Amino acid sequence: MFTRLPTLLCGLLLVGGSWARVVMVAPGPLIRVEGQPVSIRCNVTEYGGPREQDFDWEMSRDATGPKIKIISTFDSSFSDPSLSKRVASGDISVVRLQDNEADLKIAELKPQDAGFYFCRTPSTDSVISGNYVAQVQLTVIPNTLKVSPETPPQVVPEGSDLTLSCNVTREFTYPTYLSVTWSIKKGGASEDILTFGPQGEVVTGSQFTRRYADGDVRLVPGRNGAFDLVISRLTTSDQGTYACSGTEWTHERGGGWTKIVESQKEMGAVTVTPTERSLNVKASSYSSPSSTSLLLTPGDSLALLCSVFADNLPALTLEVSWLADGNEIITMDRSGVVISNTSSNGALGKRGEVTLERTEVGEYRLGVRAVSGEDGGAYTCRTRAFIEKGGRSAGIGRWQLTAVKTSTPLTVKVSERKPNFTLSLGATQKPSRMFEPMELSCGVTDIVSLPPGGRLGVRWEHTGLPSKGNQPSPQLIGSLDGNGNLLPGQVYTDKLKSGQISLSRLQPNTFKLQFLRPQDSDMGQFVCTVSSWSVGSQGDLVKTSEYQSSPLTVQWDDKPPALNIEARQVRRALGGGDTFEMSCAVTPVNLGGWLGFKVDVNLQEGLQSNARTVMSLSSDNVVQHTDPSRRDSMVLTKTGPAEFRFCLAGVQLSDRGYYSCNITADSKQQPEQEWTPVAFSESNKIQIDFQVNGPSFSVAIGSDASSVYPWETAKIECSLSVSGPSPKTDDLTYEVRWFFTRLRGGPTTSEVASIDRFGIVRKTHRNSSSDVSIERKNAHVYLLNLYGTQDSDSGEYYCEATPWYLSTSTRAWTEARALTSGRVFLSVKFAVWDSLKFPLLYGAAASLGVGLFSLLLGLVCAHCCCRNTAHTPRSRNKLINFEMD
């Protein structure tokens, strides 16, 4: 054990010898400015002992001179007496950043603080290795940084440029560098605009990056420390207090830039005047600028001048428009393109030839050649001012609208003698009820001063009758201009196109309005307005005057339309197979015009029963049958303008009841339009009631046996009898159906089979192995056969028969009332002995056969296989053989 101890100690020494303490300070030399703070960092690594290390700071004027103790993290009395006051006041302090790192801080450098600084760490290592002290040189230079800005103008118009000049200098005795920063303060927040330096680079604020890229913010370096920052195209968002900052930097070993001193000076507050405040627009006559109104005669030329004034007019791009009575007639956009709005239809299209040109900066001339009466009005000049925002980064310019101003109106009058005339409005054809034609005439008399080539136009308006608390407004029906062009009103467009309403000119001074089929909504007041048209300077017609007539009230008795319908029996049905005819005549009340009638022939079995439609005739004379099987025996025709006839041939018992006509009056304005119901009524009722005078029938059912055994055949007979006037055998046939229910008297039945009057047999699907057939024994007897009956065929059976006979009067087949027979019960027995005798006999025979076969087999085996052929002679000895024991 003792032999291993030296080896262990040697290993520990080797491990300890691998440690190499490293103490490092900031790379130097350090250049700092007098009066500014400094921080010198020191850290230690690769040390032994406790994690927390202590630091002692010393300094000397030169590298080999005596050292002065500054401060220690371990010993509070470490400081030299010459520095104790500065340590106590906090001017000199040490701040521990980590266990192995601390900062020496001097709040305000003095010239005597220049020298070499030593950071020493007391040893806590087991073996002395590495370095325990590091030094750095600190140079203290005087503060020679000067910032001298020029005061910018206090008020700048919007869109102008602002130049911010700032002079930043320092004495170049040590290798230091300068940078300059411009900032703006709005409210309480300050934002950097641009920073230049210290290596010549440019850094912009986040809000000015785009503007710098677009060229709206640019730097103009000067000489002798002078720097100019130019902000182009100012907006109101650029107003605020501007400041200039100068910074002195040192480039220390390791590539880092350190700010050593900074100075900021306020340049002054700048207010940006909005363009809207200084923009002014004036409209004047080109010949007399002071005049506010002009009086022209038709054919003269009009020249107006629009003058635009603004503090920053060269920085603005203008869009100028001329308006007459608020309507824009011509515009010169900001690119100089002239857009005329007088080429469109309507009032603006009747003006003379309009031109717009720019005579000088801020001067725009409007010219109108050969004015007419339509060119009179209040002329105003509207200006829209834009500021172009730089767009080099996006490749296009960006425009910002800054102000819109409109001049005071300049009145232009064109003297023209307008024609004068009077109007007379009357009804040449007045309806007395709805759908009767109406015609109104508007005459022009006493025409004065209508120029040669002048024409008249008319406009018709209608105002409906007032309703409860509602006063309707006038609606334009339509108008005819000087050229005779029809301009329909929005509400009456469809009626004018379809011809229900027509506007015409009978004579040059007489106009007519016609309603072919007026409705109640067309009652009310009518007014005609006649306008005069003369030939304008461009050869087109121009409206010069118009006069309105007195209103004319058109009203008729608006009683509701009604129908009077009378049903009359033309031919009476006295018995089955006869023909019934009925006529329905319609008398309209308060109805006129194009009418159509929709006829429904209804049938009620009783006066309190519900009615059903048996046949219909539409207003377009289209027939509809509700029962297709009676299509050949029913006829409904129109025999007159308002008369209809219904014919029913071969009446049957099911046709008895009360017949009536339900008629609806339909109306439409034009033949191609759809019918619209306007009135409805029902006729009186006509009864078909006859006694049965044909043959009468009865039916009975019977069976050959009430009970059968399984697999036997059961026969059920349905026999019919005829009483009264019996038709011939060839004129009589039956429809027969058999029904079955499992329970005696049960309500749920199912059809077994049927045979129609043409002899066609139909069998329903059965869940049994049995089968059925129908046999007609004679003209009145039908037999149902059940083959191979099963237990599921047990139940109650009955038949239902419907006789059909040929009527002697009409020679048409007539359906008689369906007859139902009584019921018979068929029972399928279950025979126990019959079902068991054969299995028992078969079993006994099989058992006897097996027994005999077993006996015979035993005898054969005993005889042939079990016999001993070897003979053993018995001993003659009287003693019993031992083997026998």
Image: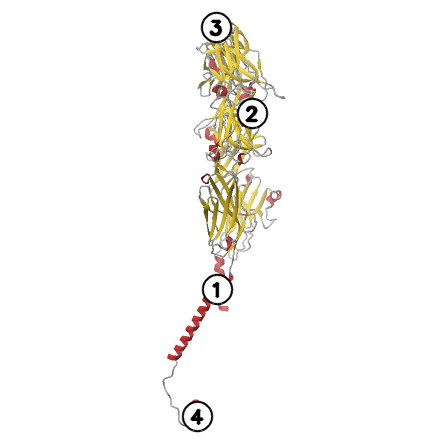
Nearer-N-terminus badge (2/4): 2
Seen from the viewer's position, the closer of residues 200 and 405 is 405
**Callout 3, which amino acid?**
Pro
The residue to which callout 2 is attached is: 566
The residue type indicated by label 2 comes to: Glu
Q: Residues within 10 Å of mark 4 (few under 14, many from 20)?
A: few
Name the residue carrying label 4: 880
Query: Which kind of residue does numbered mark 4 sit on?
Result: Ile
Count of marks placed on residues: 4
| Mark found first going from the N terminus, 1 or 2 | 2
Density class for disc 1 (Cα within 10 Å; few <14, some 14-19, many ≥20) is few
Give the secondary structure at mark 1.
helix
Quadrant (top left, top right, bottom left, bottom right) of the C terminus: bottom left
Q: How is the image coloured?
A: secondary structure
* In this view, 364 is above or below 766: above
Query: What is the distance, in whole Å, between disc 2 and disc 4 at their CAs?
Result: 145 Å
Instruction: Report, in whole angstroms, how far the alpha carbon at label 1 lies from the one at label 3.
Output: 134 Å
Circle 1 is placed at which residue position?
837
Sequence order check, earlier mark of 3 and 4: 3
Task: Answer few, some or many: residues within 10 Å of disc 2's Cα (few below 14, many 20 plus, some between 14 and 19).
Answer: some
Q: Position of residue 454 (x, y in %)?
A: 47, 8
Between disc 1 and disc 4, the foreground one is 1
Whichever of callouts 2 and 3 sits on the residue coming sooner in the sequence is 3
Does the residue at mark 2 contact the one at mark 3 (Cβ under 8 Å)? no
Q: CA distance from mark 3 to mark 4?
A: 185 Å
> Residue type at mark 1?
Lys
Mark found first going from the N terminus, 1 or 4: 1
C-alpha gap between disc 2 and disc 3: 66 Å
Quadrant position of residue 684? top right
Q: Residue furthest right?
A: 469
2 vs 4, front mark: 2
Q: Residues within 10 Å of mark 3 (few under 14, many from 20)?
A: some
